[in-house]
C-alpha cells in the first residue's frame, strides 16, 4: 500500500513538473511568437473507468451483481504530429472489500499509441502491466471527445482490455469497460 502511494505521488509530481514553465523575458516572448510553434504538443487527462462486464474462462461477471471495481486514470500525451499521439497512463484501481476480505488497490501502467480518426473520434492501443495482480496484456479503445468552450474536452471511451496471467479458473480475461474524463 505504501509503495502504491509513493508511485502515485511520483506520477502527480511528474505531471505537475511537466506543465511548469518559466515566464520568458519580453524579448524572448516576442521571438517565441514568431517561431513556428505548436502549443498543443503536450496534453493530459484525468477520469474514471468502470469495468462493466468481465469474461474469464467460461464465466461472465457483471458489475454490481458480481463485483465492483473503479479506476481513476491520469495520463500525459505527447503529440509529435496530427496523425499519431503517444500516451502514458497510470490507473489506480480500487476494489472495496467486505467483512471477510480487505479493500484492494492495484496500479495499471498503461502506455499506448492513439490515432485521431476525425470528428472527435480516436482509436488507440495500449500495453497493460497490472502491478498487484501480475497480469499483462493490451487494451484497444475507441474515444469520442466533446470540445468545451473554455478549452479542453470532455470524453467518453469504450475500452476492451484483454489480460493474461494468474486468474482463478482462467489464464485469459476479457473486459468491457467505460472510461469518462476530461482532457486538457
Image (cartoon, rainbow, N blue to C red):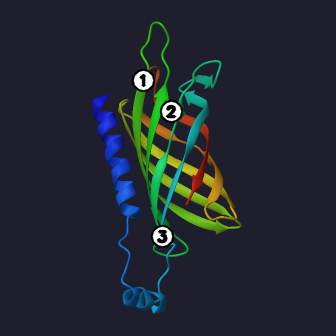
Who comes first in sequence, dot 2 or dot 3?
3
Who comes first in sequence, dot 3 or dot 1?
3
Residue visible at 57% across and 40% down in the picture: 49
Task: Locate residue 86, reporting x and y percent.
Answer: 45, 63
Kindly tell me whether residue 32 is visible in this rendering.
yes
Task: Locate residue 1, reporting x and y percent.
Answer: 32, 28
- Of circles 2 and 3, the one toward us is 3
Residue 173 numbered mark, or none: 2
Residue visible at 48% across and 16% down in the picture: 97
Q: Mark 2 to mark 3: distance in Å?
A: 31 Å
> Are the residues at dot 3 and dot 1 in contact (C-beta closer than 8 Å)?
no
Left or right of 121: which side holds 33?
Answer: left
Left or right of 17: which side holds 47?
Answer: right
What crowding class fits label 1: few (fewer than 14 Cα within 10 Å), some (14-19), or many (20 or more)? few
Task: Locate residue 27, reporting x and y percent.
Answer: 38, 91
Q: Mark 3 to mark 1: distance in Å?
A: 34 Å
Q: Mark 2 to mark 1: distance in Å?
A: 19 Å
Who comes first in sequence, dot 2 or dot 1?
1
Q: Residue furthest front?
A: 26
Nearer the observer, 181 or 136 = 181
Residue 79 numbered mark, or none: 3
Kindly tell me whether residue 167 is visible in this rendering.
no
Residue 104 numbered mark, or none: 1
Nearer the observer, 24 or 62 = 24
Amino acid at each position: 500500500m505504501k509503495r502504491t502511494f509513493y508511485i502515485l505521488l511520483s506520477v502527480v509530481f511528474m505531471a505537475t513538473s511537466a506543465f511548469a514553465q518559466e515566464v520568458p523575458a519580453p524579448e524572448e516572448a516576442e521571438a517565441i511568437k514568431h517561431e513556428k510553434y505548436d502549443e498543443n504538443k503536450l496534453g493530459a487527462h484525468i477520469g474514471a473507468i468502470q469495468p462493466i462486464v468481465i469474461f474469464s474462462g467460461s464465466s461472465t461477471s457483471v458489475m454490481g451483481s458480481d463485483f465492483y471495481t473503479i479506476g481513476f486514470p491520469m495520463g500525459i500525451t505527447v503529440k509529435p504530429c496530427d496523425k499519431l499521439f503517444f500516451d502514458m497512463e497510470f490507473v489506480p484501481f480500487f476494489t472495496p472489500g467486505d467483512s471477510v476480505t480487505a479493500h484492494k488497490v492495484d496500479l495499471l501502467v498503461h502506455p499506448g499509441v492513439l490515432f485521431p480518426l476525425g470528428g472527435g473520434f480516436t482509436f488507440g492501443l495500449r500495453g497493460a502491466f497490472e502491478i498487484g495482480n501480475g497480469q499483462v496484456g493490451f487494451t484497444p479503445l475507441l474515444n469520442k471527445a466533446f470540445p468545451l468552450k473554455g478549452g479542453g474536452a470532455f470524453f467518453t471511451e469504450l475500452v476492451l482490455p484483454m489480460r493474461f496471467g494468474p486468474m482463478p479458473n482462467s489464464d485469459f480475461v476479457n473486459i468491457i469497460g467505460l472510461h469518462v474524463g476530461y482532457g486538457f
